[in-house]
Amino acid sequence: MNSPRPATVHDLPQIIDLLDRIFRREKGVEDQSVLTDFPLVFDDDNLANCRVIERDGRIVSHAAVWPRTFRFAGKSISVGIIVLVATDSRYRRQGLAAELMRDLQVAMPGLGCQLGLLWTGVPDFYEPLGWGVVQAPGWIVREATSPQDRRGRLRVVDYETNRHLDALHRLHRDQPIHSRRTRAESAKLFTLPKCPVLVGEVDGYPVAYLVEGRATNKRGLVEYAGDPVDVWELICHVTTARGPQQLLIFPTHPELAELARGAGLTIAPLKSSKGFGDEMVLLLDETVAEAGVVEQLFCWGLDQA
């Protein structure tokens, strides 16, 4: 029986075929692939953090961790984001996914991770492995609409890497809570398939952005940065142009919640920072719990691997 092992570049075609079949084709999604939806997970620098199990000469189970560093309240915390846990239907109920998870959980402290983070529709699977459900801070608007096209100071344009990358990279970095992204990582994340980015400019300079998730794994208005009034203008622009959208309002932008309430929108507490499924954490460093990090941390849309 083969034990969990790190993936290699030679495994990628089998891994992608397995995951696309389970997470895309079996769900009726033919125009997305996990390879392009999760480019940083399958990047050369992270490939060894993808774990696989083989049976009968084929890869039949996979799980990955993507280490990220988050900044907030002047602190840094290293988080291991768990993604793409899946087993071929012919090999399920043999404990393979649990074996992969235990292998990753042993490896995560060595990667510097102080906390594990994942999103799931099956929390009962992860609870025996030590994970607990948490509620993300913030609010959700299930159907954000614009009572009118709120025209303000912005010129709204589509994102272009050559024109906008550096400014948007800085806007994200200036958020009170943010992940530490390299410029190269931002370049990949701002060009994810089915996640168009709108940019608000003043006198030709980007002052705000908004990401509209149209992908099966990213839905609604999932990330933004800039002054809340400018972000609200972008929200009004996209909902006027494309109709109602799911809007996630994170605690760094309480002014957005007030603007949404003022527009007559119904706001509910946010269950998970994805807007759907359960959010779960695994404590790897007790000092994280003592500092109240779990209650304050949230993960922006593009950082959800």
Image (cartoon, helix red, strand yellow):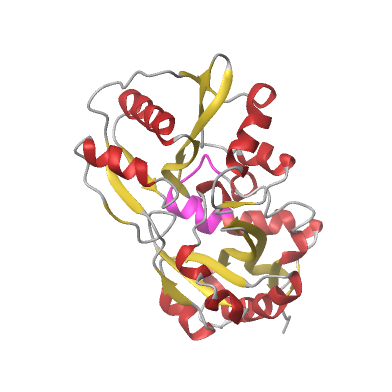
Residue in front for this viewpoint, 86 or 103 = 103
Point out the residue furthest to the top here: 203
Range of the magenta residues? 20-32
Residue in front for this viewpoint, 189 or 74 = 74
Residue 81 location, quadrant: bottom right
Residue 7 location, quadrant: bottom right
Q: x%, y% of residue 62?
A: 63, 67
Point out the residue furthest to the front here: 74
**Left or right, 75 with reference to 240:** right
Q: x%, y% of residue 289?
A: 53, 77
Query: What residue is rendered at 54% in x and 78% in y?
Result: 290
Figure check: 206 above or below 50: above
Residue in front for this viewpoint, 239 or 170 = 170
Is residue 191 visible in the rendered image? The answer is no
Residue in front for this viewpoint, 64 or 86 = 64
Is residue 75 visible in the rendered image? The answer is yes
**Residue 192 is one of the magenta-drawn residues:** no
The quadrant of the image that shows the N terminus is bottom right
Query: What residue is rendered at 50% in x and 51% in y?
Result: 24
**Left or right, 15 with reference to 280:** right
**Left or right, 163 with reference to 246:** right
Q: x%, y% of residue 30?
A: 50, 42
Figure check: 79 above or below 102: above
Q: x%, y% of residue 267?
A: 25, 49
